[in-house]
Amino acid sequence: MKQILASRELLLLTAIGLLLMLIAWRFPGFVVPSNLVVVFNDTSPLILLAIGQMIVILTRCIDLSIAANLALTGMVVSLVNIAVPSLPIIVIVLIAIGSGTVLGMLNGILVWKLAIPPIVVTLGTLTIFRGIIFLLTEGKWVNSHEMSDAFKAVPRTDIFGLPVLSWIAIAAVILFSVIMTRTTLGRAFYAAGGNPHAATYAGINVGRTQFWAFTISGAIAGLTGYLWVSRFAVAYVDVAGGFELTVVAACVIGGVSIMGGIGTVQGALLGALFLGIIANALPVVNISPFWQMAISGGAIIIAVVLNAQANRTPGRIILKRAEHAT
Amino acid sequence: MQLEIRPNVSSRTAPDIDPLLSLSGITKTFPGVRALSDVSLKLFPGKVTALVGENGAGKSTVVKVLTGIYQPDEGGIRIGGQPVRFPTPQSAENAGVTAIHQETVLFDELSVAENIFLGHAPRSKFGLIDKKAMVARAREILSGIGAKIDPGATLKDLGTANKHLVAIARALSIDASVVIMDEPTAALSQKEIEELYELVENLKRQDKAIMFISHKFDEIFRIADFYTVYRDGQMIGEGAIEDVNEPELVKMMVGRDVSQIYPDRDHNIGDEVLAVEGYEHPTEFANIGFTLRRGEILGFYGLVGAGRSEFMQALFGITRPSGGSVAIDGASITIRSPAEAVASGIVYVPEDRGKQGAIGTLPIFQNVTLPSLARTSRYGFLKLAEEFKLAREYTERLDLRAASLDTNVNNLSGGNQQKVVIAKWLATQPKVIILDEPTKGIDVGSKAAVHEFMAELAAQGLAVIMVSSEIPEIVGMSDRVIVMREGRIEAELDRKDITPETLVTHAAGISEAVQ
């Protein structure tokens, strides 16, 4: 399976390469390193969120509240910044991660303890989170001039030619690659989603594992919330509206099985990059945004078909079970 | 040795009537297994024929042949003397053959009338479903079987017994002449069973031919007119119920030589390792107590639904018992989760290994180490080298052949998947291993290998609990057997007392002992 996974990721990498070549043929300026850095930086929030979503989907759940969590946390840290402009940025970052974590835990508790289907839980919290932003601000925007300079500077600061935002995405890819492949928690995510019954018998608490998936997804969403509002220097109710679907799309294109149990951090990264490149390239080569949607949609369907092919288990019929399956 | 009992249709109770439906020379094979071999069956109008046999005798297969789900490889079906074929379930229904299945196949969110007429609802002249006619017909059928159920009620609001009546009404709604009842009383209370008997009498008066599958002998002798016995997919005997008694039926069901294919074991039984006392659950089982020694194989026998798996799941911490105590090596322990059970040295290899055993999307080594991760990790970080070592050790012990331990379990054959599951549990170094139906659904060769392996485990000092519904396996492997019936321990049998007859007698709750 590692081979198939590897080849699936290789396939996606090839597709991304071909895409870049196609764009370069029409618009060579797109593939110069300085522009690629811009594209990567622009895709970084999607990469971060896709990693969180990947973990949730791995456990047979889905987090539709991920973008709303981002927006609410972004608003919370913006308001904190207005109230106490002198607060060190590290505290702001900790507040962002903490707020996102709490919101993620809320999803996790509802899924774990009340056994409500994740799609219903997160659809509910999506609306609630956006509603809370409205209650906090009465629909008003927090604009650039209200935020402190230090608050806005962090994601743009250059380190070795890359903005901090990009470095955070890279760090997250490395950190979560290790967590997913080298820790018992990572193994539990795969086991709980791959076969919840078997995982239960092996002593894994599936509900608690799903809770941790939502918690991680929430923490990432919270951090991304700060990065997002500080980068765009604006916070309002509809920040990243509908972005949760782009995140799910990145996961699916990246080979994460919506049935749970299959997916890698690298896949989520590549899926996000694929969508990020399309989003950045199409306006440049003068293709209408409608085509952008159609191309993303086509990519999702192709990815799902490829995954379904790869996951088709070889025919082995155990008589008794075939008999029962009427 | 096979008993041959000739049909005796000329007896007093069976006048010279022609069978309404007859099967002859039916053979059905699946890859590796001959499920039915040259069996026959006759159903008479206005009579009940009981089909009797152990689990795996071929009863369900013959039901599926009769209802068009399976096509026989050889042999023919005749209705009223005319040869017929049932290439689809629909064609069987059209020919008037209907089955009421063990687990009712109904739809909780639909109304009673919709359930009854799903697939053959009366149509209005525009081709739409004629709801009025459907409800009226449903009411007619329901009152015909004496059921006081509102056709407009939603199915999920009905109790088990009423759901069953809806299933029966559904069967009758197609104007069936042949009604097959597959263990219809399994889920019913005594009062509901009495009502079912009345219904069967009612159907007999309407000249329907009824086939009745049951494990309960009192039931068979109460309502059947004829019997047919299958064993291992073969026809063993048939006749009028008057001409047979319980011991004879039991003998026909189980009569076979069981000793030869089981491994020889020297029964080296050591100290007590597990003691269970007074285990109970509000709805599933009560007062379960026993002890288990090192090197012992303790069989758990009972009919399907006797509460054996339910008890094992409670012992393993999947469900919570409402009372009782467990001790391992004399020390009292509490088991609140599977993780705690594994930590105390109890492991459970579940019955449905496809669903509950291996994780197909993970590679072999990750499956093997999953319950042992505490040993192959430190501070939550995995030690991959140790994982591989552990996985290699136990897969080699089981002679598991795979290209690499990195291979995904989904890509393995069924037998190898089974080995992964067993390796997984052995790697936890358990004291007690619970095997739930260890040979269910596997071919004869693999069965022998599993039995061999089980004997080896016991010889190494492991205490084995084997839950099995297969009498030969229980007789051939167990040092001791606990027979469960309706959630309670019915009997505990020592090695010398374990015979097919005593097992069946206790499991079915037959009052007088069979010789």
Image (cartoon, coloured by chain):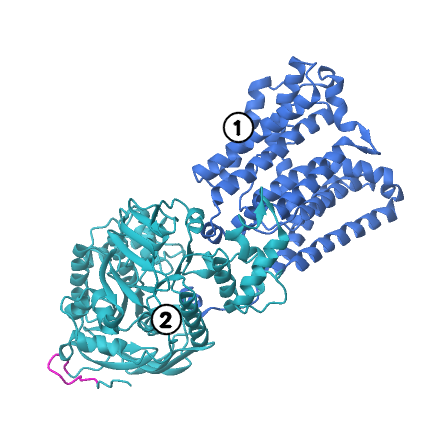
Residue A166, placed above or below residue B47: above
Residue B70 seen anywhere in this rendered image of the structure = yes
Which chain's colour is cyan? B
Residue occupying image coordinates x 55% and y 19%: A135
Which segment did they paint magenta?
Answer: B7-15
Q: Secondary structure at mark 1?
A: helix
Quadrant including the C terminus of chain B: bottom left
Chain A palette colour: blue
Circle 2 is placed at which residue position?
Answer: B64
Q: Please, is residue B19 above or below residue A245 in the view? A: below
Label 2 is placed on what type of residue?
Lys
Residue sitting at 63 percent across and 43 percent down?
A: A179
Q: Residue at x 21, y 84 (%)?
A: B7
The question of residue B14 being in magenta is answered with: yes
**Residue bearing mark 1:** A128
Label 2, label 1: how many angstroms apart (C-alpha)?
A: 52 Å
